[in-house]
Amino acid sequence: MYNFLNRKWYFDRIYNQFIGQNALHISYNFSYKNVDRGIIEALGPSGIVKSVQATFNSLNVLQSGFVYHYLFLFLIGFLAIVFLSIFFSNFWLSLNMIFFLLLSIMFI
């Protein structure tokens, strides 16, 4: 029995062909294609890029290119800062901040 199994009967080739190659093929299809290229890239780099592109494409509609639209938005933002500083902080501190903001806008 020992002499029979000791010689080269291509057991390693049969093992490689049927068991090893099938295991490698299954692991390539499952772990590499589905997990690495599928889930990790969808949640990682590719997913982040797609979500940023979608966000900026939706924000691109808001831009008109007219200066008076941008000035109107600047005025609304400035008034929001002023009113929030008045209502949510000390009154005298907010007046000083409003004065500082007005001076800084004049010098810009």
Image (cartoon, rainbow, N blue to C red):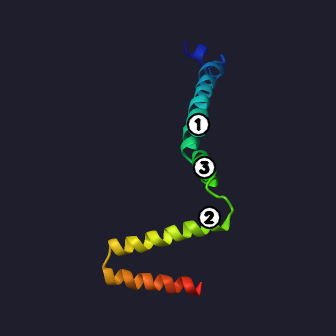
Give the residue at the far right of this rendering. Answer: 65
Kind of residue at badge 2: His
Q: Secondary structure at mark 2?
A: helix
Other-residue count near label 2 (Cα within 10 Å), few / some / many at <14 / 14–19 / ≥20: few
Residue 32: x, y in percent? 60, 35
The one nearer the camera, 41 or 68, is: 68
- Screen quadrant of the N terminus: top right
Mark 1 → mark 3, Cα distance in angstroms? 26 Å
Instruction: Give the residue type that dot 1 points to.
Output: Gly
Question: Nearer the N terminus, badge 2 or badge 1?
Answer: 1
User: Residue 58 bears which disc, if any?
Assistant: 3
**What residue does disc 2 label?**
69
Calculate the distance from the C-alpha at mark 2 to the C-alpha at mark 1. 43 Å
Label ID, residue 38: 1
Q: Do the residues under discs 3 and 2 have CB atoms within 8 angstroms? A: no
Mark 3–mark 2 Cα distance, whole angstroms, equals 18 Å
